[in-house]
Image (spheres, helix red, strand yellow):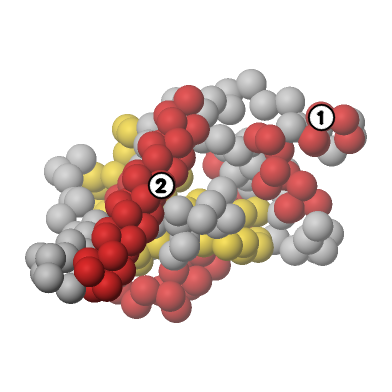
Amino acid sequence: MQSLTVSTDISDTTRTGRNAYSTFYNESRVRFSKLAGILALALLLRGDVRNCACDVAKPETMAARECGLCREAEKQPADAIVFFVKDINPNKPNRWLALPRAHTHAFQDLPPEVRLALWNATIEKARSMWGDQWGLAFNGDERRTQCHLHIHIGKLLDNVETPNFVVVDGPAGIPIPTDGTGFWVHPVGGKLHVHSGEQVTEFVLMR
């Protein structure tokens, strides 16, 4: 939250005018920031990619907003397995995305070896950025705004742990929901906690 600068010195008109302008400017920034956050949340909450129509064989379908990450995948070398892009949302300056090169919507559609390669590469990227404070999040189908499978990489916020998790030894053990819900993952004591059964999961990460 931004602090507001308010002058208490009414004897100095120059300072008062300058501080009044600063107050107006800061208040405007606060209002704009709140509005941007509300709009971003509204877009996320209305997202639903259960009926994606993105098809590289039909270029006209790729122009849709929800096909943006599909277009990014098409820019990658054909032999790439995993790639990373910075989140272009200006409200998420610390966020990166990990994606498979293959066009897929759900984890269960990836071959096991590709899924494991995606997890290994994503965790390595997350650890390089945030040490042991990393977190990964995958939003559920009802709240995703992009069709192409993507994992949010960020710093795990404090005090977000819930009792709804399973403990796995490593990436190979991460369970994949088959009901369209999302999940989030973070390290604890050399193992991984996997939280599932949620639609919006990225809010556990620093924006």
| Callout 1 secondary element | helix
Above or below, 64 against 84 in this view is above
Q: Residue at x 51, y 28 (%)?
A: 47
Give the x, y percent position of residue 45.
43, 29
Q: Nearer the viewer, mark 1 or mark 2?
A: 2
Quarter that holds the C terminus: bottom left
Q: Is residue 91 visible?
A: yes
The residue type indicated by label 2 comes to Phe
Above or below, 103 against 120 in this view is above
Question: Farthest residue in the top direction?
Answer: 51
Residue situated in front as seen by the camera: 121 or 84: 84
User: In the drawing, does residue 153 fall left or right of residue 132?
Assistant: right
Q: Residue at x 80, y 36 (%)?
A: 62
**Quarter assignment of residue 199:** top left
Residue situated in front as seen by the camera: 95 or 195: 95
Q: Residue at x 68, y 35 (%)?
A: 65
Give the x, y percent position of residue 8.
10, 65
Mark 1 crowdedness (10 Å alpha carbons): few <14, some 14-19, many ≥20: some
User: In the drawing, does residue 179 fall left or right of residue 3?
Assistant: right
Q: Residue at x 40, y 40 (%)?
A: 35
The residue type indicated by label 1 comes to Thr
User: In the drawing, does residue 76 fall left or right of residue 89?
Assistant: right
Per the image, the residue denoted by label 1 is 61
Quarter that holds the N terminus: bottom left
Per the image, the residue denoted by label 2 is 32
Q: Earlier in the sequence, mark 1 or mark 2?
A: 2
| Callout 2 secondary element | helix
